[in-house]
Image (spheres, rainbow, N blue to C red):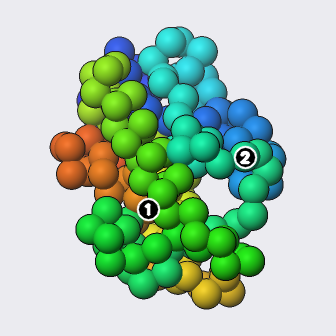
């Protein structure tokens, strides 16, 4: 990879589809990051959306991890709930597995995932109260990728020259 932020890489990166401008975020919007879009145009990116891969619709109600972070969800000690209380944990687990499968299939050693997401958050997630408060932790897919040795960062960690 040559270091985060070095887009001269020939390695394949997993990238959250919303960060490439695809309308896959919970609200049906994209969150494009120009540097990642340029990297994708060079054919170095595999777009992923763990939530969609897990079977959730677009748009979908916002969801947060309740009772821990992604690690605790993987261990069965925390759940992912929407703002209206629907338990969507199984979809998040399916999506995490599909994301890991994509990383393995394409040999991706790095994943750039959407910050704060209950799937993709790499170092902070929302606290499970749907109040907008962030806590240390990672999303379900991010946790599973890290367990498999994939480096996971957010778009916020890329740096100015991403």
Q: Mark 1 touching mark 2, by CB under 8 A? A: no
Q: Position of residue 70 (x, y in %)?
A: 38, 66
In the displayed structure, 12 sits above or below 48; it is above
Secondary structure under the numbered disc 2 in the rendered image: loop
- Give the Cα distance between marks 1 and 2: 18 Å
- Residue, disc 1: 139
Density class for disc 2 (Cα within 10 Å; few <14, some 14-19, many ≥20) is: some
Q: Residue at x 50, y 12 (%)?
A: 43
Q: Position of residue 52 (x, y in %)?
A: 61, 42
Q: How many marks?
A: 2
Q: Residue at x 49, y 81 (%)?
A: 66
The tag on residue 10 is: none
Residue 105 picture quarter:
top left
13, 142: nearer the viewer: 142
Q: Position of residue 90 (x, y in %)?
A: 48, 57
In the displayed structure, 95 sits above or below 130; it is above
In the displayed structure, 12 sits above or below 109; it is above
149 displayed left or right of 53: left
Density class for disc 1 (Cα within 10 Å; few <14, some 14-19, many ≥20) is: many
Q: Residue at x 34, y 19 (%)?
A: 106
63, 115: nearer the viewer: 63
43 displayed left or right of 25: left
94, 113: nearer the viewer: 94
Residue 86 seen in render: yes
Residue 102 picture quarter:
top left
Residue 1 seen in render: no
47 displayed left or right of 150: right
- Residue, disc 2: 57
Secondary structure under the numbered disc 1 in the rendered image: loop
Q: Position of residue 134 (x, y in %)?
A: 54, 80
């Amino acid at each position: 990879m040559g270091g985060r932020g070095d887009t001269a890489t020939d390695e394949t990166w997993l990238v959250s589809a919303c960060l490439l401008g695809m309308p896959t975020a919970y609200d049906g919007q994209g969150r494009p990051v120009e540097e990642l879009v340029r990297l994708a145009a060079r054919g170095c990116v595999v777009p992923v959306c763990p939530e969609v891969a897990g079977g959730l619709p677009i748009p979908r109600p916002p969801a947060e991890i309740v009772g821990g972070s992604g690690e605790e969800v993987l261990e069965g000690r925390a759940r992912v709930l929407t703002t209206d209380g629907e338990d969507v944990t199984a979809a998040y687990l399916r999506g995490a597995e599909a994301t890991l499968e994509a990383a393995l299939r394409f040999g991706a050693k790095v994943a750039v995932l959407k910050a704060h997401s209950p799937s993709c958050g790499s170092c902070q997630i929302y606290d499970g109260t749907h109040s907008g408060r962030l806590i240390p932790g990672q999303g379900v897919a991010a946790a599973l990728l890290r367990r498999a040795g994939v480096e996971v960062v957010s778009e916020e960690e890329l740096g100015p020259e991403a």
